[in-house]
Image: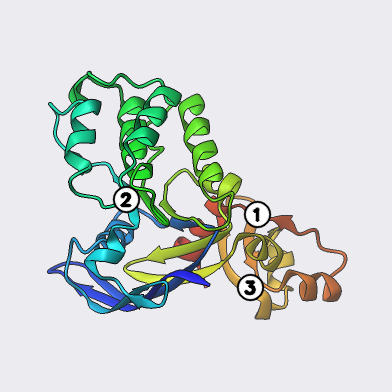
Amino acid sequence: MNVLQVNHVSKQYKDFALKDVSFVIEKGTIMGFIGSNGAGKTTTIKAILGMVDYNGTILMNDQPLTLEAKQRIGFVLDDVHLGNFVTGADADKILSRVYHHWDSSYYFELLETFELPRNKKYAALSKGMKIKMLLAQALAIRPELLILDEPTSGLDPVARSEILDILLGFVEDENHSVLISSHINSDLEKIADYITFIQDGAIILSEEKYELYQKYGILRLTTDEFEALDKKYVQGYIKNHYSIDVLISDVPAFKAMHPQIDVDTVELDELMIFLSRGER
């Protein structure tokens, strides 16, 4: 079952537009949302959360995304918090009045687990502690869906690893789901089940992560080898000083036709670069 369906969502700004954005998130999965700065990730997330108006439909559990449904969505956005002078204890008093399913006991258990002080103001926390504080608040509403916009940006490797472990634990029972946008694609390679790639406000692909690895591959060719290549598999290429890197699709069929050519496994960073900047 899909916990979230984003159907043909569009949003027009003066100098940017979301263009017919559609994707689904299955229950019990983590969706990695990737794209360059200004591609439309944050605008899409804010549309889901009802922070911006849009054309199209967004459904949760096959139902309209009502205020009651939004009670089941926890979120972490870098620029959205209760205020610089709010302590962890203050947040409990505030959010318990906002969310119907707020769990104070679980919240304070999370603060202890994350080694966060109850009485320290938000502004006095480190970057990593702020993210974990926001994550504790998002989890304490007992959400079905957790939405995070660049939660590991600027964190050291240890703090990032802790956050990723928390997200993996959250979806372990297969009843909870995560949508996480990130520029750190190595993090998504560790935890994501699906990848959605947005570029210039449009969805380029939305597929299971391991299917992407099987579908796409990289060739490292000389100019002569590239000129002789059957181009029907080529999705993009980048010319270097002495070679040409080529993104191909349908790797099994390509290998069957060209067993003599080595095919490297594609990484998310490379896939983004080829699909956004590679020549066709």
Nearer to us in this view, 123 or 253: 123
Taking 136 as reference, is 159 left or right?
right
The answer, for residue 156, to whether it is visible in the render is: yes
Task: Name the residue at 15% across, 29% down.
Answer: 86
Residue carrying label 1: 243
Which callout, 2 or 3, points at the residue further toward the start of the chain? 2
Taking 62 as reference, is 85 left or right?
left
Residue carrying label 2: 101
Q: CA distance from mark 2 to mark 3?
A: 51 Å
Nearer to us in this view, 196 or 75: 75
Mark nearer the viewer, 1 or 3: 3
Q: Identify the secondary structure beneath mark 2.
A: loop
Instruction: Note whether 169 is above or below 155 in the view shown.
Output: below
Identify the amino acid type marked 1: Ser
Quadrant of the image occupied by residue 219: bottom right
Is the residue under label 3 in contact with that under label 1 (CB below 8 Å)? no
Count neighbours of disc 2 (C-alpha within 10 A) and say few if under 14, some if 14 to 19, many if 20 or more. Answer: some
The percent position of residue 175, horizontal first and vertical second, equals 53, 58
Mark nearer the viewer, 2 or 1: 2
Task: Name the residue at 50% across, 27% down.
Answer: 157
Identify the amino acid type marked 2: His
Instruction: Note whether 153 is above or below 41 in the view shown.
Output: above
Q: CA distance from mark 1 to mark 3?
A: 16 Å
Nearer to us in this view, 214 or 174: 174
Quadrant of the image occupied by residue 84: top left
Identify the amino acid type marked 3: Val
Q: Identify the secondary structure beneath mark 3.
A: strand
Residue carrying label 3: 234
Which callout, 2 or 1, points at the residue further toward the start of the chain? 2
Is the residue under label 3 in contact with that under label 2 (CB below 8 Å)? no
